[in-house]
Amino acid sequence: MMPRCSVSSKEVQLFQSLNGLQQLAETRRFKAWFLDQFGVLHDGKNPYPGAISTLEKLASTGSKMVIISNSSRRASTTIEKMKSLGFDPSLFMGAITSGELTHQYLQRKDDAWFAALGRSCIHITWSDRGIISLEGLDIQVVENVEEAEFVLAHGSEALGHPSGAAIPMKLTDLEKILERCAAKRIPMVVANPDYVTVEARDLRVMPGTLAAKYEKLGGEVKWMGKPDKIIYEAAMAMAGVDASDSIAVGDSLHHDIKGANQAGIQSAFITGGIHATELGVSNFGETADLSSVEVLASKYNAYPSYVLPAFTW
């Protein structure tokens, strides 16, 4: 029997504590597994111990696997990244990323909200990580806030230049630009809703932090990824499954687990990711104190179905 732990909320919430995925996977209860990448499969630099072999074993059960990520990169770039880290791309049905969804919505503009955006934008992007290409989009990057019709946030390191270059900027300087944008009351599209991400055990500020700041300034934000159900619905469509046949695996209570809750699907919370410090976890594979998980789940109002230290078999 798997130990079961209750979580206090408006309703009684239960999660099962697992040491690995084998017992759950071999029940073949779920036809599709939606997997976060950073903090679950790898840390941005290297795969986590056992992650590659666990994927292979999960695939052997006949499970369909889709990467769902708040990465601001296109899906093809994400798959190439996984391949470069030693993962076999053929194990996945594909990837659904915030960056891919953003690109598609900006390109098609068949959604009323996106159709009303206009063309001119302030582009907040990456510098060290590499600028995000806007090729194929009918968009004009501008430097002057007065000329901008919306803000497009792919990164948190630089301001996009009309030439296609990126001008590195401190977070505080980017926030000053956003203050002017908010005062003008132009909307923002955030192509990576994450607040922070795990990178070689360190946490780095992500575009979601800027988007949250923009909302506090009174700006309107379109969140193109987790925890919005848009990304889960896209993953279910790709896998050809219903919510009842799906499970999401992630390390962020606010993004992965709350998103799964809102999409009506089961979830598995990896405690060794971005919440490791909050949970008092200092070593890979270390089991978090379940009472600490309860408290944190209540704090974020996000309730996993299963809890385990790492993505291992």
Image: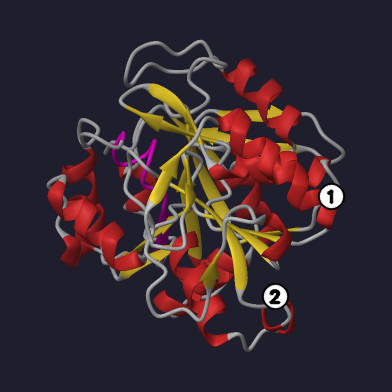
On the image, which quarter does residue 38 sit in? top left
Query: Position of 45 compared to 218: left or right?
Result: left
- The majority secondary structure of the magenta stretch comes to loop
Q: Nearer the viewer, mark 1 or mark 2?
A: 1
Residue 260 drawn at (x, y percent):
60, 54
- The crowd level at tag 1 (other Cα within 10 Å; few <14, some 14-19, many 20+) is few
Which residue carries the number 2 mark? 117
Q: Residue at x 79, y 46 (%)?
A: 215
93, 131: nearer the viewer? 131
Asked whether residue 106 appears in the rendered view, the answer is: yes
Q: Residue at x 18, y 44 (%)?
A: 52
Is residue 245 magenta-colored? no
Q: Residue at x 28, y 61 (%)?
A: 77
71, 264: nearer the viewer? 71
Which residue carries the number 1 mark? 183
Bounds of the magenta segment: 32-43
SS at mark 1 in the image: helix
Q: Is residue 113 above or below residue 81?
A: below
Q: Quadrant of the C terminus?
A: top left
Amino acid type at circle 1 is Ala
Pointers 1 and 2 in contact (C-beta within 8 Å)? no
